[in-house]
Amino acid sequence: MTAGLSGNLVLVLLGIVTLLAVASLVILALKSSLPGNDYSELVLRIRTWWAIVAIFAFAILMDRIAAIILLAFVSFLAFKEYISMIPTRRTDRQVVFLAYLSIPLQYYWICKGWYWLYIIFIPVFVFLLLPFCMVLIGETKGFLHATGTLHWGLMITVFALSHAACLLALQTGTSRPASGEGMLLYLVFLTEFNDISQYFWGKLLGRHKVTPLVSPNKTYEGLLGGIITTLLLAFPLAQVLTPLTHMEAVIAGLIIGIGGFIGDINISAIKRDLGIRESGKLLPGHGGVLDRVDSLTCTAPLFFHFVHYTHY
């Protein structure tokens, strides 16, 4: 990573810290001026964001391997929450254990930079192995449901999320300074900011629901406002963190804005089907890890392949 790009990373991270500081001060001002209102959930959310930003910033500034290990741990926690949510057969415990083993292997291939292996490992080899192991156990009742839910969980929490780490394995083929760390920060920040923007604009202007049966709070106004806000940030951030051209930055903003919405409602549909509100309680004010990375399950693979096939 060039010194200039390292400086850009630090500047963007400082900008994020500044946004959090402003949000914290706004909440303190609201508590002082309107003490009758309950701000406990907002306070918990901001505190959790401080912790998330601190851990993420430390990892990407410290070392590429440290960042990949952090993302592997996030995949592990997300998959663990997924498995705890869905009904599983007692006979599948060994197969679930094998599914867990695929997580360090997937991220090991990424560390080594073996593109064709980490891009087919779960969709091909694990996809074929797990049902075979279930067949050897001999339990056929619920076989289709068990294989389908386990494979889908691995695809969204491990394979899809691991594309964020795949950005760290890319080597730029352009003359512009770029790094995996810069593109990872670009992806994660825009994805999370898109979530916040869609929530904000939905609360402010929302009238017409997009998916009333899946996520009643999602509105067309919130979706459009979030996408526009993400586009406005995608362009300037691309100039300092990525090799994207002006038009490519616009496309990336659209990918993240629309993809984030799709990832969000996919996980919402799972929780709605299971009759639960949150995937876990690990992140105070946010729910579980899967609740926080739901949008990233869609934006990470879409953004990675867009960047990979346009610049690498």
Image: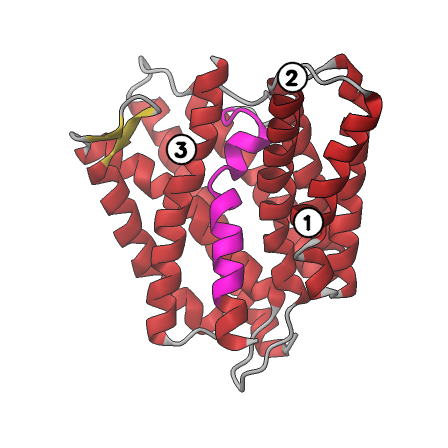
Q: Which residues are magenta?
A: 285-306
Alpha carbon separation for disc pair 3 and 2: 26 Å
Residue 120, position in %: x, y?
Answer: 67, 55
Q: Position of residue 136 (x, y in %)?
A: 83, 27
- Prevailing secondary structure class for the magenta stretch in the rendered image: helix
In this view, the mark in front (3 or 2) = 2
Q: Position of residue 274 (x, y in %)?
A: 50, 15
In the image shown, does 1 or 207 lie closer to the viewer?
A: 207
- What secondary structure is marked by label 1? helix
Q: Residue at x 68, y 14 (%)?
A: 141
Of the 4 image quadrants, the one containing the C terminus is bottom right
In the image, residue 287 above or below residue 256: above
* Pointer 2 residue: 142
Between marks 1 and 2, how big is the CA–CA gap? Answer: 22 Å
Q: Is residue 286 magenta?
A: yes
| Residue 156 as seen in the image, left or right of residue 80 | left
Label 2, secondary structure: give it: loop
Q: Nearer the viewer, mark 1 or mark 3?
A: 1
Residue at x 40%, y 62% (from the top left corner): 252
Q: Label 1 amino acid?
A: Val
Name the quadrant containing residue 108.
Answer: bottom right
Using the image as rendered, state which of residue 241 and residue 268 is in the foreground: 268
**Image quadrant for the N terminus?**
bottom right
Q: Please name the residue that numbered disc 1 is placed on.
A: 124
Mark 1 and mark 3: span between their CA atoms? 26 Å
The answer to which quarter of the image holds residue 36 is: top left
The vertical placement of 305 against 50, above or below, is: below
Kindly state the secondary structure of the residue where label 3 is placed.
helix
State yes or no: residue 301 in magenta.
yes
